[in-house]
Image (spheres, grey):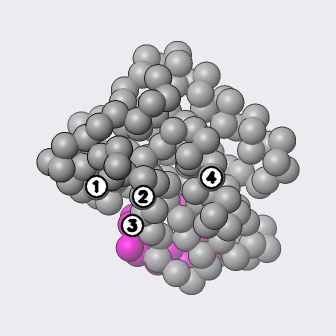
Amino acid sequence: MNSRPKFTPEQIAALQTAYKQAIYEVYNSGQTITLSIDQEHPQLNKLMQQYQVASWAIVTAVNPYSQPLPELENRQRNQQLQTYLQRLNLSILPAVGKDCHGDWTPEPSFIILGIDRQNAIAVGQKFAQNAIVYGAINQPATLVWIGLDNGR
């Protein structure tokens, strides 16, 4: 299932709200860095300085185009994403996207350290995502939509 479904305006609005309110966690050496959209994250800035990078993105491969898949298929998709990112020789750490209300299953993800916005969008597109989370040092985390326009 990699064809983008056609969403109603109401469905798009609900997805945008859910993604914007989600909690994103990054795991590094036993430490959890919690991220929220439109907020700056000093702990993440320190991590970026440690890796000597200026930008980052959080991308998942699970539930393509926000369509739930069985757990096994999602695990396989995320393994494919990890392999793809490792082949590109990108620095990655495990991450997860969580619903702030606990209504949907947390989505395993990766934070990609040092990736620019254009390449991060390309990864999100390759793995059939509606959006990615992107940020730069000393800047707030942003939600970047990837063609969520009802198929137009």
- Mark 3 lies on residue: 37
Q: Residue 26, percent across and down?
A: 56, 54
Mark 2 is on which residue type?
Trp
Q: CA distance from mark 2 to mark 4?
A: 12 Å
* Image vertical order of residue 149 relative to residue 36, above or below: above
Q: Residue 137, percent across and down?
A: 61, 79
Q: CA distance from mark 4 to mark 3?
A: 20 Å
Q: Residue 23, percent across and down?
A: 38, 54
Mark drawn on residue 16 = 1
Residue 2 in sight here: yes
Q: Earlier in the sequence, mark 2 or mark 3?
A: 3
Q: CA distance from mark 2 to mark 1?
A: 9 Å
- Mark 4 lies on residue: 122
Marks 2 and 1 close (CB-CB < 8 Å): yes
Mark 4 is on which residue type?
Ala
Label 1 residue SS: helix
Mark drawn on residue 145 = 2
Part of the protein shown in magenta: 32-45
